[in-house]
Amino acid sequence: MKIIAIIPARLKSSRLPEKVLADIAGNSMLQRVYAIALSTELFDQIIIATDSEIVMNHCIKNNMRAMITSAAHQSGTDRIAEVAEMLDSDIIINIQADEPFIEISTLEALVELMKNQDVSIGTLTKRIESTESLLDYNTVKLVKDSNNKVLYFSRQAIPAQRDIPYREWLNNGAYFQHLGVYGFKRKALLEVTSLIPTDLEKSEKLEQLRWLENGYEVFAATVKSLSFGIDTQEDLVKARTYAHSLKFSADQ
């Protein structure tokens, strides 16, 4: 199977503009993500998909393969589909450009999931460890069945525990956070990006609900991950501190 990793890299992020080029201990966020993907040796090609000439020039300067895409895309999935349509591939892995500490084992788990012939769309999940994350609308949760097929994604804490106060939910059940990395069989990717937005998607602001509403199955593998996305200035400060601590540990 030919496996291609595509990293959508939009420059004009609404909450933290130009974050993909932000410096983290001497390398841009985008360089870090690309280097991790490259180090896995999982992929036949790794391509950055961007609508920005600034990002494109950054990629050229740092020997990262990139392609210019339309500026009209509403999501990273739409952006990678434009690239995938031009490529010969069996599996496309969508790696987020704002995950500079994503683990190799995490990507390995997703690729292994996507090698299953019954899986057209795959993603990852990890157990939620804090009540703060459980109740945070920026933390997307999911529930799945006994065969690892996702039943629903939500910004709410799901499942609800009717007779127990919110703050006690985590002590009385397992909750899982969705990790925003996806795998697609090429045909499924091109199909789901042709669908129009649905009511559930508009309500939760989660594009994956469009796929579920249209009958597509999404499977999720559970991993142990310490990685975190960079969405705000506070996240960026945290990332820089974390990167320096890793460098310090490596130097010891």
Image: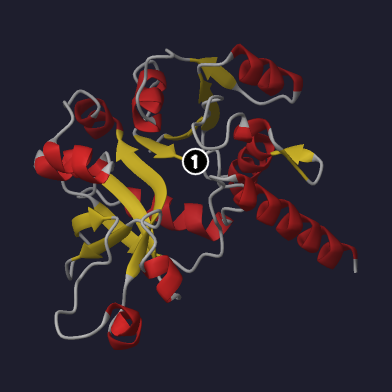
Quarter of the image containing the N terminus? Answer: top left
- The residue under the point 25% across, 27% down is 193
Q: Is residue 249 left or right of residue 207?
A: right
Foreground residue among 192 and 164: 164
Q: Quadrant of residue 19?
A: top right
Of all residues, the one furthest to the right in this rendering is 252
Q: Is residue 142 left or right of residue 224?
A: left
Foreground residue among 98 and 18: 18
Residue 92 x %, y %: 39, 35
Quarter of the image containing the C terminus? Answer: bottom right
- Say which residue label 1 marks: 96
Q: Is residue 13 left or right of residue 112?
A: right
Which element carries disc 1, helix, strand or loop? loop
Residue 64 x %, y %: 66, 26
Badge 1: how crowded within 10 Å, few (<14), some, or many (20+)? many
Q: Is residue 221 left or right of residue 31?
A: left
Residue 139 x %, y %: 39, 57
- The residue under the point 68% across, 15% down is 57
Residue 167 x %, y %: 34, 80
Foreground residue among 111 and 80: 80
Give, as a three-letter code, the residue at label 1. Answer: Gln
Asked if residue 217 shows in the view, the reply is yes
Asked if residue 115 shows in the view, the reply is no
